[in-house]
Image (spheres, helix red, strand yellow):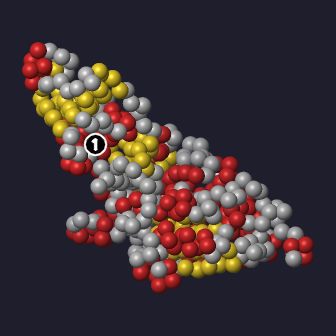
Amino acid sequence: MSLEEQLLVRKIDWGTVIDHIPNWRADQVLKLIEVESLIKEPDVSVIVLKSVPSRKYGKKDVIKLYHYFIKESDAALIKLLFPTVTINFIRDWKVQKYVPNLPEELVGKVRCPEVTCISNARREPVIRRFRVLKEEGYVECYYCDALLEISSIPDFIAE
Amino acid sequence: MPGEQSAGPIIREDLRGRDLVSAKDLTRDELGIVFEVAKEVESNLDGFSNVLRGRRVALLFAEPSTRTFSSFYIAARRLGGDVLPLNEPEMTSLTKGETLYDTLKMLEGYGADCIVMRHPSRGAARFAADVVSAPVINAGSGSQEHPTQAILDVYTILKKRGKVNGTSLGMLGDLRFSRTVPSLAYLVSNFDDVELHFIAPTALQVRQEVELYLHDRNVRYTKVTKQQDIPDAISRLDVLYVTRLQKERFPDPSEYERLRGSYKVDMGMLRYAKSTLGVMHPLPRVDELDTEIDRTPHAWYFDQARYGLPIRMAIFALVVGETR
């Protein structure tokens, strides 16, 4: 971390640091981790930095989740969308770099873009599932075959 | 008593207990098995009269259907099966707000050995197959797929042309919202040197997932979107599969009025065609297919409709039938 970065980005002793997010994409990552749900966690602070200088990428976004560890499945989803991202879990200043396995399937998290899909039917006990077609850049609904661009996933996070 | 029944045909077990949710579920060999049994049904109908003896087939149709429902109904009855027809909205309770899940569980509780289902939601058949242990046969899942129609469509091509390999198949009309078109495209991708031509305005072109599937399987296809290119496309075809342009699918009604003539199949359009071209249609037709064609050798659609029965009998026999 350069001096300039250090001045802008204070270190945390406990929680998650999501670094090297492409410039101005932090909001999409926040959607993926459903940051709004953290409102119920009084000890958690969310620090969002946008357009921070980066030696490697010129500019980047960083998210620090103080006193919160993101789920492994969310880490995998973030990595799927933004391959440049690095995820660190910090415990007592000790940094553990977390490299998620890229998912072959997304379960529960993403809503099908096809409005007539059974997985969007209210009251049906359907578990949302998508197959990841990484090379093609899509995920495919297990039920209705509809394709969703990986880059559009943040707009289809299930409520 | 089983011992007193006349000896029926020997039914292979390859597809026994299997769901038929998507045309993608079938390999070419499995399709060949369905065709073998369908041919046997055509030549020896009486021999199959006990194949579903003691089996209960539920027909759960949550969307209007005359032909598909009737052909499944007759197919199950001719095989000697018991049929539980749930095709009136009040009978299915789905209109009362019952979930599809509960309806399926109820049918399972009634001891259905097989559930044939049509539903307006895409993906409903896959969901149903996960919910119940009995095999589920998809009779139309919204605009997604209609695999048994595609099986009888390919059977028609085989019967009429003597082969499916090397077929140049055009699909014309509303390809985006058609459920028969994806299933047929998936199924013919099992054969060699098949070429597909999707003839439709851009807004009604074939869906992205179909293109991706064909691309992955190295199937050659073209998209014909301009009216002026239609005659040239027609001239290349061995088979033309017609679906209806539906006015309600067009955001602008004047666009529909402008295009409908170009997508009406009549003798004028067929003057560009090979003399051997076969015209197919899943029926019912409205005005997209001129009745003039009925009297010509191009008209394959009535035979196509007729093949629905042996094909559906074959599917029942293979999936849920008595084996000796």
Quadrant including the C terminus of chain B: bottom right
Residue A82 in sight: yes
Residue sitting at x 33%, y 32%: A79
x and y, in percent, of residue A14 in the image: 25, 29
Residue sitting at x 63%, y 64%: B134
Total marks shown come to 1
x and y, in percent, of residue B4 in the image: 90, 76
Of all residues shown, which one is farthest toward the right? Answer: B3
Check disc 1 and report its element: helix, strand or loop.
loop
x and y, in percent, of residue A136 in the image: 39, 37
Residue B187 in sight: no
Task: Decide if residue A123 is on the left or right side of residue A65.
Answer: right
Q: Residues within 10 Å of mark 1 (few under 14, many from 20)?
A: many
Q: In terms of image quadrants, where is residue B35?
A: bottom right
x and y, in percent, of residue A135 in the image: 40, 34
Q: In terms of image quadrants, where is residue B299?
A: bottom right
Residue sitting at x 55%, y 55%: B23
Kind of residue at badge 1: Ile
Q: Is A116 rendered above or below residue B57?
A: above
Q: Is A139 rendered above or below residue B109?
A: above
Quadrant including the N terminus of chain B: bottom right
Residue sitting at x 68%, y 66%: B316
Q: Is B124 rendered above or below residue A79?
A: below
Task: Decide if residue A73 is on the left or right side of residue B124.
Answer: left
Q: Mark 1 = which residue?
A: A33
Q: In terms of image quadrants, where is residue B172?
A: bottom left
Chain letter of the residue carrying label 1:
A
Task: Decide if residue B253 is on the left or right side of residue A123.
Answer: left
